[in-house]
């Protein structure tokens, strides 16, 4: 652990922020690993969860009127003294909130074309999507009947567009490409008068009144939440995943790293048993992800911006930004394709799924860099996807520059993670892994040749053809397929 005292204060702001994010990310993962996972008992949910685990790779999208300012999603409304809640200097909080809440009146994403997104994601090898129907600021990207703060409000220019019900259009476009459909939904709603009540100040991310003192008011908010989730799971076609964010909204007093800097001495219980019963009545077998609220309604866990050091003993998914921000930032820096592919491999080798986020621009587009990354990943997946989909973790998971996955039939994939500008090596050594008797050993993308190999002390060495570097089109990582290995 480290302190944010004098030594931290001398560091540059950006570096200090990065350290804080990494620290809390690691703490969250460690905390999650100490809390028992509650396995699902519904047979249909179990079946769907197993299918989801086989898909491995998904797309997350953050989008809302805040994209017009190119700022962090929602968080500048929060009064906490943390880096991601910063507002412009010289402006009062009240004046800033007024300006922020007027953003929908200029939101007109005329280039919105979810079919283009779905095609690009499919080409990249993604198999499921999670879309932000509502973030913490309370703006609804769907045509809810329970709030006027929504994309279809007459005050929003885009409401005249035939695709104005954005969430419905996104779900439909991706469903037509055979994606599983996930609805991101924020449990806290900072716009709702029964969450952040106008009578009192809003010192932090939590609701700003004692729910025990004002049970009727809190019940109105819980009913509002139930009603909106009923809309999303009954009027938008098949929904496979309900991805609930805002883990501080939960029964009891929060104790984990996601509770926020403002700890409230009251419960924020929105009655998850009632919500789960309702959404599973509407969508039998739906996967529920009540993020960071460990228990019955967290069907899988979601380490954020981090890949665990080792496999986790429950279903999990790393959610990570393709650029530096969850939301759109002009001229943002995008992670290199090589890094993204290596992260995908690292996650899958440890038994997880990879949910990669793209922030959508105010006019309804992905940045050119995002499309480029999706194309590069897709080119790699076309050759090497069989080492990703339907695989399980295989010990030793990762050694040096080689990661491992396996199929149910005993096939093992050794995925060599290349350094930047590294050429395909002439041989690859595997520690503790030896092809079985009669095994076929091949290089994906160069299937017509069975590779030669020899046993070495403590493992094996696999030789690669001299012309493989010219013939195999895959970049960034190469995959050796071994039809069977000796039992370890």
Image: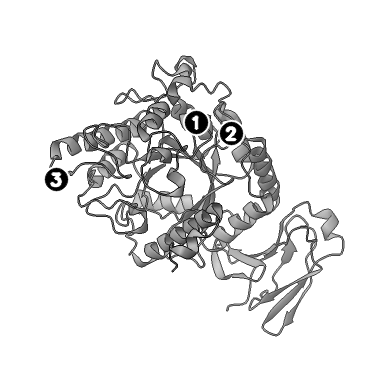
Q: Which quarter of the rendering shows the N terminus? A: bottom left
Q: How many marks?
A: 3
Q: Considering the numbered disc 1 on the image, is that residue within a helix, a strand or a loop? A: helix
Mark 1 lies on residue: 170
Query: In whole angstroms, how far apart are the C-alphas of marks 1 and 2?
Result: 9 Å
Tag 1–tag 2 contact (CB < 8 Å): yes
Evaluate if marks 1 and 3 touch, with contact meaning CB atoms under 8 Å apart. no
Q: Which of marks 3 and 1 precedes in the sequence?
A: 1
Q: Is residue 140 visible?
A: no
What residue do we see at 74% from left, 58% from top? Answer: 420
Residue name at image x 74 percent, y 53 percent: 475
Q: Which residue is mark 3?
A: 212
From the viewer's perspective, is residue 326 above or below residue 138? Answer: below
Mark number, residue 160: none
Helix, strand or loop at label 2? It is helix
Give the camera-side residue of 172 and 343: 343
């Amino acid at each position: 652990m480290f302190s944010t005292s004098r030594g931290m204060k001398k560091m540059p702001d950006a570096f200090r922020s990065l350290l804080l994010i990494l620290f809390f990310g690691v703490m969250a993962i460690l905390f999650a690993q100490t809390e028992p996972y509650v396995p699902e008992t519904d047979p249909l949910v179990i079946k769907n969860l197993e299918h989801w685990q086989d898909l491995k790779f998904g797309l997350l999208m953050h989008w809302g009127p805040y994209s017009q300012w190119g700022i962090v999603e929602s968080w500048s409304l929060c009064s906490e003294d943390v880096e991601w809640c910063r507002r412009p200097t010289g402006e009062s909080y009240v004046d800033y909130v007024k300006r922020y809440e007027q953003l929908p009146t200029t939101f007109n994403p005329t280039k919105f074309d979810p079919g283009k997104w779905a095609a690009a994601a499919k080409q990249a090898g993604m198999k499921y999507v999670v879309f932000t129907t509502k973030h913490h600021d309370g703006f609804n990207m769907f045509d809810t009947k329970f709030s006027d703060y929504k994309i279809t409000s007459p005050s929003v220019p885009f409401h005249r567009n035939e695709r104005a019900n954005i969430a419905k259009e996104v779900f439909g476009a991706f469903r037509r490409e055979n994606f599983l459909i996930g609805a991101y939904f924020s449990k806290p709603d900072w716009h709702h008068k029964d969450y952040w009540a106008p009578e009192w100040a809003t010192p932090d991310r939590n609701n700003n009144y004692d729910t025990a003192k004002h049970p009727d008011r809190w019940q109105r908010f819980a009913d509002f939440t139930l009603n909106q989730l009923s809309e999303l799971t009954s009027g938008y076609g098949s929904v496979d995943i309900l991805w609930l964010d805002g883990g501080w909204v939960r029964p009891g007093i929060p104790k984990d790293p996601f509770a926020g800097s403002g700890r409230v001495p009251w419960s924020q219980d929105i009655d998850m048993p009632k919500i789960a019963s309702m959404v599973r009545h509407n969508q039998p077998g739906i996967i529920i992800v009540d993020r960071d609220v460990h228990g019955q309604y967290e069907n899988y866990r979601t380490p954020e911006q981090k890949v665990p050091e080792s496999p986790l003993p429950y279903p999990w998914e790393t959610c990570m930004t393709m650029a530096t921000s969850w939301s759109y930032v002009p001229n943002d820096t995008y992670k290199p394709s090589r890094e993204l592919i290596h992260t995908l491999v690292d996650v899958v080798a440890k038994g997880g799924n990879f949910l990669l986020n793209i922030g959508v621009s105010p006019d309804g587009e992905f940045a050119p860099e995002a499309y480029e990354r999706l194309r590069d990943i897709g080119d790699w997946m076309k050759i090497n996807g069989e080492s990703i989909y339907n695989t399980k973790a295989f010990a030793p998971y990762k050694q040096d520059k080689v990661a491992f996955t396996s199929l149910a039939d005993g096939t093992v994939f050794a995925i060599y993670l290349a350094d930047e500008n590294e050429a395909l090596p002439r041989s690859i050594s595997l520690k503790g892994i030896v092809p079985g008797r009669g095994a076929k050993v091949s290089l994906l993308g160069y299937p017509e040749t069975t590779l030669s190999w020899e046993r070495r002390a403590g493992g094996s060495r696999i030789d690669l053809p001299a012309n493989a570097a010219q013939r195999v089109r895959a970049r960034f990582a190469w995959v050796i397929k071994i039809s069977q290995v000796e039992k370890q």
